Amino acid sequence: MNSPGDENAEALIIVARAVRTRGLKGEIVADLLTDFPERFEDISELSGVRVGGERKLLELENYWFQNDRVVLKFSGYDTVEAAQTLVGYEFGLPHSERVQLAEDEFYDWELEGCSVEVKDGPAIGNVREVMRTGGVELLVVEDEARREHLIPLAQAIVVEVDVPRKKILIDPPEGLLDL
């Protein structure tokens, strides 16, 4: 998520996406894209990322929650017209400022791209996404033939997750990979 030509820019954790303006004072209504909305208490700046990757550092003047969204007020954006220029932006924090999870918990983006291998067996493919079903999350694993395998993210099946090596080891019950 770096700007074109800015290889040194730190990767961002996206926490909100602007969907529309609100009121007459330059406020933005944004979808929350974080499981930790309380993190806004300690934020004074956000990186705004435009489609295409262009970034701008924005000073967060105020925020509040409205239903399932957050209303953001940035310094220097004091009119509807000024705020309109931010609609469609994603707002993020440096990767280094992410909320630390427990040892056995992972962000979806940490699992995406991981190679999935059967314990004492072959590689299955790579995690394309984590699917949330309301119950146990599923790893959507795509093999070389572009077929999908749905692997429940359960301790009995997923026996090891090595994020630094981008590797997941599974012990699937018989027939799971045939579905």
Image (tube, rainbow, N blue to C red):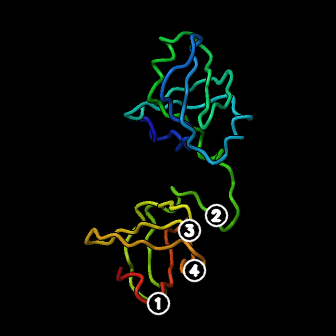
Instruction: Determine the residue positioned at 61% across, 32% down.
Output: 70
Residue pointed to by mark 3: 136
- Which mark, by number, is residue 159? 4
Kind of residue at disc 4? Val
- Which mark, by number, is residue 120? 1
Q: Look at discs 3 and 4 and give the one toward the viewer.
A: 3
Please report whichever mark, 4 or 2, sits nearer to the chain's N-terminal start.
2
Contact between marks 2 and 3 (CB within 8 A): the answer is no
Helix or strand or loop: what does disc 3 sit on?
A: loop
Instruction: Determine the residue positioned at 53% across, 59% down.
Output: 110
| Distance in Å between CA atoms under marks 3 and 1 | 25 Å
How far across and down, in percent of the image, does residue 59 sit? 63, 23
Compared with residue 41, is residue 133 higher up or lower down, i.e. above or below? below
How far across and down, in percent of the image, does residue 50 sit? 43, 30
Please tell me in which quadrant of the rendered image residue 105 appears: bottom right
| Distance in Å between CA atoms under marks 1 and 4 | 12 Å
- Which mark, by number, is residue 105? 2
- Which mark, by number, is residue 77? none
